[in-house]
Image: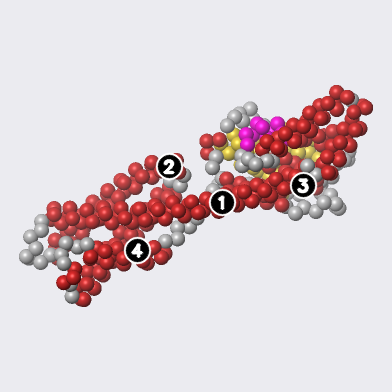
Amino acid sequence: MQKHRLNDKWARIIGVPLIGILLILLAHDSWASYSWDVWIVKFVKNTLFILFYWESNRVIFVFLRKKFPRPKDAGKKILFQVLIFAVFITVMGLIVAVINQSLKPPENHETFLDELKDTMQKSTILLFIITVCYEVAYFFGNWEHSLYESERLEKESLISQFELLKNQISPHFLFNSLNALITLVPEDPQLSVLFIQKLSNVYRHILTYNEKNIVELKAELDFLKDYIFLFQMRFGENLIIDYRLTEVIDHIMIVPFTMQMLVENAIKHNIISNRKPLTITVIQENEHIIIRNNLQKKTSGVESTHTGLNNIINRYKLLTEKKVDIVITDIDFSVSIPLILENTAL
């Protein structure tokens, strides 16, 4: 999931002096009796004090957000935040108390412990206010960002559905499938029944999962095998599929129709003939599915717009930090799709 930048410029510009004024107004002594020079000195002193605390708290906030970015790590983040703040308040309380004790006039009889207690109380209140401001701002910023990402994901999903409809439920797909079926019926009725079952499975899967963001790898592999079967009825032994999969695929998810799109592109843009058979390899490796095919591009015909591939890349950007890798050599074309564990799905 993409991270958004912490934009708190105006909060810092307005918040620091505003809290500095509030501290003067809420002081125990009568602020109304202050002369302008005392006002200025107290304001500058408070502003520097608050600025140091604000910037220190900001550093801690940013560090913890990077270390614990996921919502499920909120407990750990709060624990670390409390511990860091406790140490920070104690150390700063000692430093400020020592400085104030050394600068206080002789008639001031406040003890070091009183000074330390007062400083730590102010520090705790100040850090609490700043932390609440950042947490609220982060929550609403995250909420707004999530809405934006949801809209993007919905858009990508619509594009994916459009590509799916264009590539599979188009008259060309039906025409080719029915043509193969017409040829097959008189030759092999039993195989014809199997062909119809596979075609039905393909459309059932499309109707079931076309609005899902993720789908179980097993279900997607079953769909892919049914889909490829329909093409193998057309191309026969000229279309070679090599599966290299591990047996452990439970609780593993994938973005729906990604493998199908890549297989579709390989068939669409490469020559398939007796002299030049097309080999598509489906490999499960290091939490990735790799779709690889030998390159034998058509010199004329369909021109690639890369819409389907860009759609796959963009959908994965929204769902996970793992990247889709594309490798093109002189002899083959491969795309590595990240797998998503079920308990880490966003």
Which residue is under mark 2?
Answer: 73
Q: CA distance from mark 1 to mark 4?
A: 30 Å
**Vertically, is 144 above or below 343?**
below
Which residue is under mark 4?
Answer: 15
Q: Nearer the viewer, mark 2 or mark 1?
A: 1
Instruction: Check disc 2 and give the amino acid type.
Output: Asp
Q: Nearer the viewer, mark 2 or mark 4?
A: 4
Work out which quarter of the rendered image holds the C terminus and state it: top right
Which badge, 2 or 1, is on the more N-terminal residue? 2
- At 77% from the left and 35% from the top, the residue drawn is 228
Instruction: Check disc 1 and give the amino acid type.
Output: Glu
Q: CA distance from mark 2 to mark 4?
A: 29 Å
User: Tag 2: Cα neighbours inside 10 Å, few (<14), some, or many (≥20)?
Assistant: few
Q: CA distance from mark 3 to mark 4?
A: 54 Å
In the picture as drawn, the residue positioned furthest to the top comes out as: 190
Number of labels in the image equals: 4
Which residue is under mark 3?
Answer: 166
Residue 237 on the magenta span: no
In the picture as drawn, the residue positioned furthest to the front comes out as: 32
Which residue is under mark 1?
Answer: 149
Instruction: Check disc 3 and give the amino acid type.
Output: Lys
